[in-house]
Amino acid sequence: MEQIRVGIIGLGLRGYGLTNQVFLKMDDIRITAVCDIYRDRVERVADLIENAGHPRPYETTDYKKLVNKNLVDCVIVITSWKYHTEVVTYCMEQGIPVGSEVGGAYTIEECYQLVRTQERTGTPYMFLENCNYGQRELMVLNMVRRGLFGQIVHCSGGYCHDLREEITTGKENRHYRLNEYLSRNCENYPSHEMGPIMKILDINHSNRMMTLSSTASKSVGLHAYCLKHQPENEELCEAKFAQGDIVTTVITCAGGETITITLDTTLPRPYSRGFTVRGTKGMYTEVNDSVFIDGTHNDCDFDWKEQWGNADQYAKEYDHPIWASITEKARAAGHGGMDYLCYRDFFDHIRSGEPMPIDVYDAATIMCITPLSEISIASGGIPVKIPNFKEKTAEVKTNE
């Protein structure tokens, strides 16, 4: 396989951005087919590829026409969340390796469909969580594996990102998040930082997640934003948003660890993933990018501001090798280089045939958080069991 022929399904903001910033910067792949339900998006990305000096790709609004071994060697799914499983499982059935961008599921059955289809077909599949490739996330994973923090007890993180403009302009920009926030109340985007945390806690290997409990605050942030920024939009200003402004989910693990993840996207705030790892010998926290080691930093207890940013001191020894060798071109290719490294790993594993680094069990374990959190919130925050998707016996058809 010289150049990998890539088909892209889903050409909105994320699909266009990845094509422009990542895919067209990789010399060993070639985009041979593109698809979106909107014809203008298809033409825009096809123009982008052609104007970059590459052959114009096959264009379609029917994803099944793209999923063809005569056209592509692999497929990348960047559609709205509700189509991920449908498109991914179709690719699996056709025997074409596939990777999907992240998002939560709608039902537990959907997660089982993803797992069982991959098990039956054996088609390579990767859940394309870019935060698994974050520089600090990989550095902390290395520190954990080398015992710097001792026995890990608790991890936390989340998706803390002011999305009010993106959500409230969803109708004119044809963005799916608007309908999601109008109709659902859940942890709708759990993969940041669950992907990295699952690696740290060895989830789906020597450990697994057991239960979750979710609570949601009231929903007032989007309404306030609409009144201030779109007062002329009567329909939007009168809309009742189902999604709580802050969703907090607590997860228990078989090894005794706990995880807290937060969804915080509809109130004014700076961007953060809140990545924190706590152990018996120390901790790391992303909020002020600091490392605390027992016996080293204890005297700084009440003057911790002086240590903010001290994680840089550990980078030389603990940075992951892929970050030591990353080029400026790759670093500039979306989210500080995470996008490039994530997709580089996907294509490298297609070429080598080795098992995908973020596999279907990881995908299902992360995606199931969304429907389970929806159940927990609606039931007053009760704990809900998390399925073990590696079990080959009983499938959970409903959450009891």
Image (tube, rainbow, N blue to C red):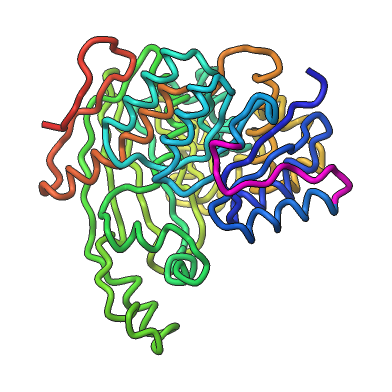
The residue lying furthest to the bottom in this view is 232
- Is 29 in the magenta? no
| Residue 355 found in image quarter | top right
Left or right of 169, for residue 214: left
Q: Residue at x 46, y 33 (%)?
A: 195
| Residue 379 in view | yes
Measured from the top left, where is residue 388 in percent x and y? 28, 19
Is 131 situated left or right of 56 in this image?
A: left
Residue shown at the point (24%, 71%) measured from the top left: 240
Q: Nearer the viewer, residue 316 or 199?
A: 199
Viewer-side residue, 57 vs 288: 57
Residue under the image location 35 percent in, 48 percent down:
188
Left or right placement of residue 102 versus residue 183 in this view: right
Residue at 62% of width from left, 46% of height from top? Answer: 60
Q: Is residue 57 magenta?
A: yes
Q: Position of residue 277 (x, y in %)?
A: 43, 34
Q: Is residue 82 above or below residue 123?
A: below
Eyeballing the image, is 398 above or below 157? above
Corner quadrant of residue 12: bottom right
Residue 307 visible? The answer is: no
User: How far from the left and from the top, in percent, is residue 63?
Assistant: 55, 40
Quarter of the image with the C terminus in it:
top left
In the rendered structure, the answer to whether residue 329 lies left or right of residue 244 reads right
Q: How many labels does the image show?
A: 0
Res 70 quadrant in image: top right
Q: Quadrant of the N terminus?
A: top right
Q: Is residue 5 above or below residue 307?
A: above
Counting from the top left corner in percent of width and height, residue 343 is at: 66, 33
Q: 151 or 197, which is in the foreground?
A: 197
Tell me where the magenta segment starts and ends, as one range: 52-65
